[in-house]
Amino acid sequence: DEVEWVKVSKMKDDGTPNKYWSMWPELRSSTMHLGVGDGAAANLGSKCNGMDRIAVTIGTSAAARICIPYSSTFILPFGLWCYRVDRNRILIGGALTDGGSAIAWARSLLNLDDNDFNDCLQRISNDYESKRSSNTVDTRQVSMIPFLGGERSTGFRTGARACVSNLT
């Protein structure tokens, strides 16, 4: 099922006059699409196109976005950004300067080689999935906000700092 922006962005020769067909006749039989932002592509490509799923992308930086229905009365929370996906939906989200660098920081801090670090991440992921599926996630678990290099969203604060809680 095509999302609306794909339908709207298609430009194909349907018999109606179009100056581009005379300028570039070789494009007459092609289908062209408007460019799509990487955030929208990440959300829609990972099936996070509704309010029930959040897309998280991690590279050098990191971002989290959720797709919600557009409303003219929507008030954007401070520090987040927002843009349209199509006529009916918007993405809201935030970003961190530290994405992959937070992982590199943890690897360095724990002094683990690649195999041991990957094994550690897999065990953590398995443990979390097990607890999540049985609805027994411990709210006292270690949590981290990785503002190692400040914040990156629209409310950019270079003074933002990392936080690790419930670590004994």
Image (cartoon, rainbow, N blue to C red):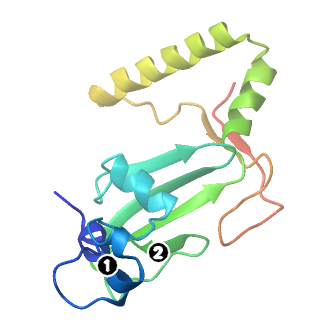
In the picture of the structure, the residue carrying the numbered disc 2 is 83
Q: Nearer the viewer, residue 116 or 162?
A: 116
Q: Nearer the viewer, residue 131 or 60?
A: 60
Q: Quadrant of the N terminus?
A: bottom left
Q: Residue at x 39, y 54 (%)?
A: 43
Q: Residue at x 30, y 49 (%)?
A: 47
Q: Reply above or below: 114 against 137.
A: above
Q: Residues within 10 Å of mark 2 (few under 14, many from 20)?
A: some
Left or right: 148 with respect to 103?
right
**What residue type is disc 1 on?**
Tyr
Q: Quadrant of the C terminus?
A: top right
**Label 2 to label 1, Cα distance in Å?**
10 Å
Q: Which mark is residue 70?
A: 1
Q: Reply above or below: 29 against 61.
A: below
- Which secondary structure lies at badge 2? strand
Q: What percent of the width, then of the height, locates residue 71?
A: 31, 83
Q: Residues within 10 Å of mark 1 (few under 14, many from 20)?
A: some
Q: Residue at x 69, y 44 (%)?
A: 60
Q: Of the two numbered discs 2 and 1 on the same chain, state the one appearing first in sequence.
A: 1
